[in-house]
Image (cartoon, rainbow, N blue to C red):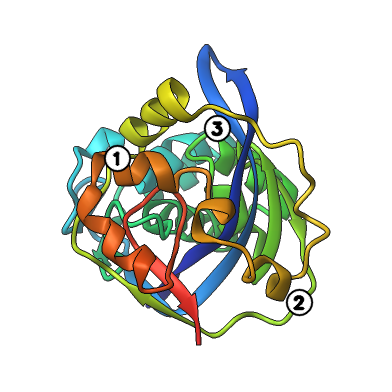
Amino acid sequence: MIKSFAKINIFLKITGKMAYKGQDYHTLSSRFMLYKDLYDEMEISLDSKEFEILGNFDCSLDRNTIYRAYKEILPFLNQQQREILSHLQVVVNKKIPSGGGLGGGSSNAASFLCWVNDFCKLDLERERLCEIGSRVGSDVPFFVSGYTMANVSGRGEVVEFYDEEALKVEIVNPNIPSNTAQIYEEYSKNFYKPSQENWFYLENNKILEKSAFEINDLLAPLLKIYPNLNHWVKEGFFLSGSGSCFWRAV
């Protein structure tokens, strides 16, 4: 059984925009922290008639991050390895809420890439796996890195180790899945103000002295779309990523 951990964003600041493979992305600076008390469970077996992914997913197979990771790793396999992997069955027990900003899909993809690298003895370095993962999703490189905490920039592909003890946090799930694309669109349309500050030099305890709106630039657009989530801000929680889950240090 493979544990595919969640993450939180201790802060998330939008720094601008960039184009990548014909698509426009917002660039960010953020501090990611692996949250090991919440994880999906992945079981991989080799006796399926075809490559299949089983689990409580809310997307089609071609949009599933594990399947996209599978397609991206194929060029690095020889013919025998490709044949073996074409009979994989990946069963995922989803515990990380979809649309919660906790990186469940990205974590699944990263866990799968690391498993293939080990199983097929590809000996791909972490930097190369991160590069492959970045083509699947912006948060995948962080999960591939193996870091507990990291400063992340670009569109998510630049991951730098951050040396500080992990926070003990409480996470709440309001059970309102958020639409990341819609939140970024709302931010771009009505809240776009790229950050010029360097937050990477701030220690976590200094960050926690700031308000929830200062810490995450996507909170204001999120609350405009999902006003019911304002309750958690009033309770002293911070937003994780662009999702609907909130956290606070305990």
Residue at 38% x, 38% y is 221
Q: Nearer the viewer, residue 206 or 200?
A: 206
Q: Nearer the viewer, residue 101 or 14?
A: 14
Is residue 117 visible to the viewer in this orientation of the structure? Answer: no
> Which circle, 3 or 1, is nearer the viewer?
1
Height in image: 28 above or below 53?
above
Label 3 SS: helix
Q: Amino acid at mark 2?
A: Glu
Which mark identifies residue 224? 1
Residue at 64% x, 48% y is 129
C-alpha span from label 3 to label 1:
43 Å
Residue 92, position as x, y percentages in the image: 27, 64
Q: Which residue is mark 3?
A: 75
Q: Are discs 3 and 2 less than 8 Å apart at CB?
A: no
Q: Residues within 10 Å of mark 2 (few under 14, many from 20)?
A: few
Residue 207, position as x, y percentages in the image: 67, 66
C-alpha span from label 1 to label 2:
34 Å
Label 2 SS: loop
The mark nearer the N terminus, 3 or 1, is 3
C-alpha span from label 3 to label 2:
37 Å
Residue at 46% x, 43% y is 218
> Which circle, 1 or 2, is nearer the viewer?
1
> Which circle, 3 or 2, is nearer the viewer?
2
Q: Amino acid at mark 1?
A: Lys
Q: Which residue is mark 2?
A: 164
Residue 86, position as x, y percentages in the image: 33, 44
Position of 110 with respect to 151 (left or right) is left
Q: Residues within 10 Å of mark 1 (few under 14, many from 20)?
A: some
Position of 138 with respect to 182 (left or right) is right
Position of 240 with respect to 114 (left or right) is left
